[in-house]
Image (cartoon, rainbow, N blue to C red):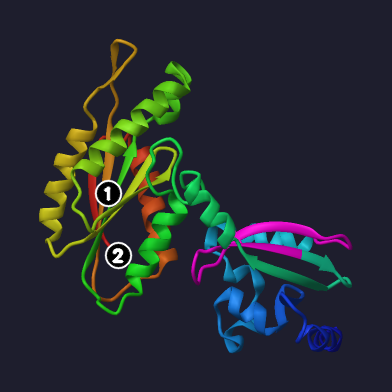
Amino acid sequence: MVAEADKIADILRYAPGAYLVIDDGVIRGANDDAVEVMGIPRARLVGSPMPELAISEMQFTVARFLDESSQTVTRHQFRLAAGLTPIELSSRRISDSVVIVGARVMELEHQMSALAGGALTHDQITGLPNRYHVLEQLHQRLGSSAARPLALIAIWIDDLVRLGEERGVRVVERVSRQVGERVQARLRGPDLLGRFDDGAFLAVLASESTAEQLSEIAERLRNEVSLPVEFDGGLVSFTSSVLVATIGVRRPTLDQIQTKVEAMGSKLASSGGNRTEIIAI
């Protein structure tokens, strides 16, 4: 089957557009346009399992996309671990194991989204950068040659799902917007704040403060963001949990950071929330 994949790769080598030849989930060939679109050198691209190019949370989806490819063209959008730029894939199955995948960067969609209010890069409820955009910015800062110490502050609104069930979606939106505004007001110009998921926010800070100093800042922040929110003439009370994560000159990977932050979020939620934790990544 490898010979069949190699033959198809030779045919597509000079084809216009970005094409990859996938054999049992592994990239066996890529034309020049594919190398440019994917942003990965050919030596690293060819021979790599296709799902592993995606960020961890989308690897299963990409694997399923390849498995479910048929004789007709199917399409899917995902983000590369290399750059987090949205890419649209189209696939056509050639045989039991060989799939031809076309790829294109969603650059035009990004530009149109910016004109329309940033729907692809910003959260529509809070107006803050969304999960993928804040992770993209974090990825760039991790790879910067100016290896300044970084810190992360993650803020979770405790029991937001329960609040929505009891008071409705408008309350959830109001509380989320207010928390985002309160956190943003406490950040400096170079700092970046984004909405990490429905009930969580992630701030990326260039900071040389000690862990203890950051912990004090985070505790004050937790108290401030947890103040009741006005809604329909009344007050909505809630609590929040905060995680401070320090990042030294020796950089972790983006996947390692996401895994630790999400694990701590689950731990804080299972313990009842309303607390501040500090870790080093």
Give the percent coordinates (x, y) of residue 44: 58, 85
Residue 243 has which mark? 1
270 or 244, nearer to the observer: 244
Please say whether residue 281 is visible from this viewpoint: yes
- Label 2: few (<14), some (14–19) or many (≥20) C-alpha neighbours in 10 Å: some
Choose top left, top right, bottom left or bottom right for residue 158. Answer: top left
Residue at horizontal 51 percent and vertical 68 percent from the top = 81
Give the percent coordinates (x, y) of residue 21: 76, 78
Relative vertical location of residue 105 with respect to residue 223 in this rendering, above or below: below
Mark 2 — residue? Answer: 281
Please say whether residue 275 is visible from this viewpoint: no
Relative vertical location of residue 213 with respect to residue 38 in this rendering, above or below: above
239 horizontally vs 257: left or right: left
Local secondary structure at mark 1 = strand
Q: How many marks?
A: 2
Give the percent coordinates (x, y) of residue 259: 42, 58
Residue extent of the magenta highlight: 68-90
